[in-house]
Image: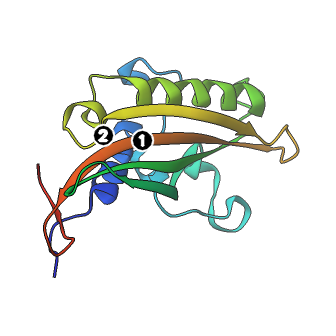
């Protein structure tokens, strides 16, 4: 039985760490509290009050796997960063402006090559493939989805278990 953490899970953890950098103190446009960055999707109407916004949710998508050599595997995994903002009359910004700021922050945080996502060796390439918007139909909320594709490679032993290196 394999006991190591799968690379896909390590990359998801790295993505959460990177997203938790989105704070105005780190020169981002948006202040997202750590408790509002999660891998669990929530229903904005039923499970979230005003203090839960803005929020970011990370979900897993498909993974393409291909063999490179006998014992090396190349993979490309899709992750979705789903963001939600709620109109704040005190902030003097409409939801779409808040969403635009948060989208820019998410893209900048993910593409910052000095962060753990890029430097710890789990990911070999990171791409932002698409950004989808709700077109303002959810006001007073606004939501979006950023599609992130991360390429990585790993080795496996004769039993097919993932190994480092």
Furthest residue toward top: 27
Badge 2: how crowded within 10 Å, few (<14), some, or many (20+)? many
Q: Nearer the viewer, residue 159 or 60?
A: 159
Whether tag 1 and tag 2 are in contact, CB under 8 A, the answer is yes
Q: Secondary structure at mark 2?
A: loop
Task: Identify whether 115 is placed above or below 139.
Answer: above
Q: Secondary structure at mark 1?
A: strand
Q: Nearer the viewer, residue 144 or 21?
A: 144
> Which residue, given by chain and number where applicable, does mark 1 sit on?
150
**Left or right: 93 as drawn, with respect to 101:** right
Residue 43 is situated, as x and y percent measured from the top left of the image, at 67, 64
Q: Which mark is residue 123?
A: 2
- Residue 102 in which image quadrant: top right
Q: Residue at x 80, y 43 (%)?
A: 134
x, y (%) of residue 119? 21, 31
| Residue 51 can be seen, yes or no | yes
């Amino acid at each position: 039985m394999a006991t190591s953490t799968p690379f896909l899970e390590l990359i998801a953890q790295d993505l959460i760490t990177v997203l938790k950098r989105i704070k105005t103190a780190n020169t981002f446009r948006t202040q997202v509290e750590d408790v509002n960055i999660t891998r669990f999707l929530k229903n904005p109407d039923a499970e979230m009050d005003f203090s839960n916004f803005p929020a970011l949710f990370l979900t897993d998508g498909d993974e393409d796997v291909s063999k490179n050599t006998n014992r090396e595997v190349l993979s490309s995994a899709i992750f979705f960063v789903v963001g939600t903002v709620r109109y704040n009359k005190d902030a003097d910004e409409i939801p779409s402006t808040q969403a635009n700021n948060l989208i820019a922050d998410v893209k900048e945080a993910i593409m910052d090559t000095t962060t753990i996502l890029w430097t710890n060796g789990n990911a070999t390439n990171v791409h932002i493939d698409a950004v989808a918007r709700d077109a303002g139909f959810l006001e007073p909320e606004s939501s979006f989805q950023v599609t992130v594709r991360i390429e990585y490679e790993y080795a496996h032993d004769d039993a097919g278990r993932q190994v480092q290196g």
